[in-house]
Amino acid sequence: MTTLDNPTLALALTVILRPAIQSDLPKLEWYGQYTHFRNLFRRTFREQEQGRRVMLIADCNDFPIGHVFIQIGGGQSRLADGNRRAYLYSLRVMEMFRGQGIGSRLLQEAEVIAAEAGFGWTTIAAAKDNPRARQLYERSGYRVFMEDAGNWSYVDHEGRVRYVHEPCWILEKQLRLR
Ligand SMILES: CC(C)(COP(=O)(O)OP(=O)(O)OC[C@H]1O[C@@H](n2cnc3c(N)ncnc32)[C@H](O)[C@@H]1OP(=O)(O)O)[C@@H](O)C(=O)NCCC(=O)NCCS
């Protein structure tokens, strides 16, 4: 029997873009793939409740199959200054759902959220070893305006500090309200 002979179901799935809710938090770990980010997810959710960040989720059948986070509050940095520039980060789609436009829609909706909150610009980082992400952002209207050494750290679910070194391009886009 060849693959072509196998019984096949063609599914039409509905994906809803919405802010995260509390019950998404364990599911965001994607069955162990991102358990090490448990504290980060919790902290980001708290900051969403305080109006400083938005966790935008791509929901399929009540499961977060993709997300992008938006930093809208605080900060004096060139990435997010609290009033003109919002920073989009942690754009990720589950591997089996990639290449179907979900990442691009998350990006677009994050920009709408930022624009409606009064921001004129969004910024985003693309790791230098991830040229396809940079291409995706450039196709979406972003341009590189600086680079960053990408040094940061977080505390994992076992209380260990994890250090990340991920040199990246920083891109920006001027938003236009629809
Ligand atoms: C980047 C990512 C969010 C895109 O999501 P997506 O739903 O596949 O995006 P879309 O279907 O809207 O667009 C596909 C485009 O994404 C880009 N892309 C970047 N990394 C990719 C990957 N690992 N697989 C597929 N596409 C990827 C490509 O430009 C691709 O277009 P192409 O097929 O013509 O090369 C997704 O690939 C992902 O989660 N990658 C791993 C995490 C990551 O790299 N995030 C970016 C942080 S720097």
Image (cartoon, rainbow, N blue to C red):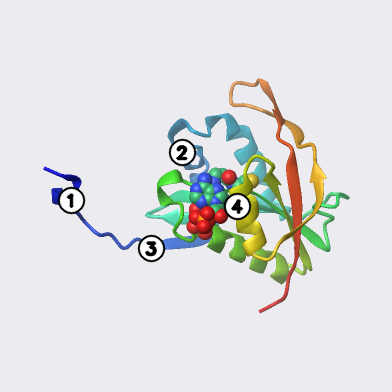
Q: Sequence order check: which comes first, mark 1 or mark 3?
A: 1
Answer left or right for 165 relative to 30.
right
As shown in the figure, which amino acid type bears the numbered disc 1?
A: Leu
- Near mark 2 (Cα within 10 A), the count class, few <14, some 14-19 or many ≥20, is some
Tell me the CA gap for discs 4 and 3: 18 Å
Tell me the CA gap for discs 3 and 2: 19 Å
Give the percent coordinates (x, y) of residue 42.
Answer: 61, 39
- The C terminus lies in which quarter of the figure? bottom right
User: Which of 67 and 3 lies nearest the eye of the viewer?
Assistant: 3
Q: Which mark is residue 30?
A: 2
Q: Which residue is mark 4?
A: 68
Q: Which residue is mark 3?
A: 14
Tell me the CA gap for discs 1 and 3: 26 Å
Give the percent coordinates (x, y) of residue 99.
Answer: 46, 55
As shown in the figure, which amino acid type bears the numbered disc 3?
A: Thr
Q: Which residue is mark 1?
A: 4
Element type at mark 3: loop
As shown in the figure, which amino acid type bears the numbered disc 2?
A: Trp
Q: Residue at x 68, y 66 (%)?
A: 141
Mark closer to the observer (1, 2): 1
Image position of 66 with respect to 164: above or below: below
Mark closer to the observer (4, 1): 1
- The image quarter containing residue 172 is bottom right
Tell me the CA gap for discs 1 and 2: 30 Å
Answer left or right for 106 relative to 172.
left
Circles 1 and 2, Cβ within 8 Å, touching? The answer is no
Q: Is residue 20 among the parts visible in the rendering?
A: no
Indicate yes or no: mark 4 CB to ligand 1 under 8 Å.
yes
- The image quarter containing residue 130 is top right
Q: Residue at x 43, y 34 (%)?
A: 31
Q: Sequence order check: which comes first, mark 4 or mark 3?
A: 3
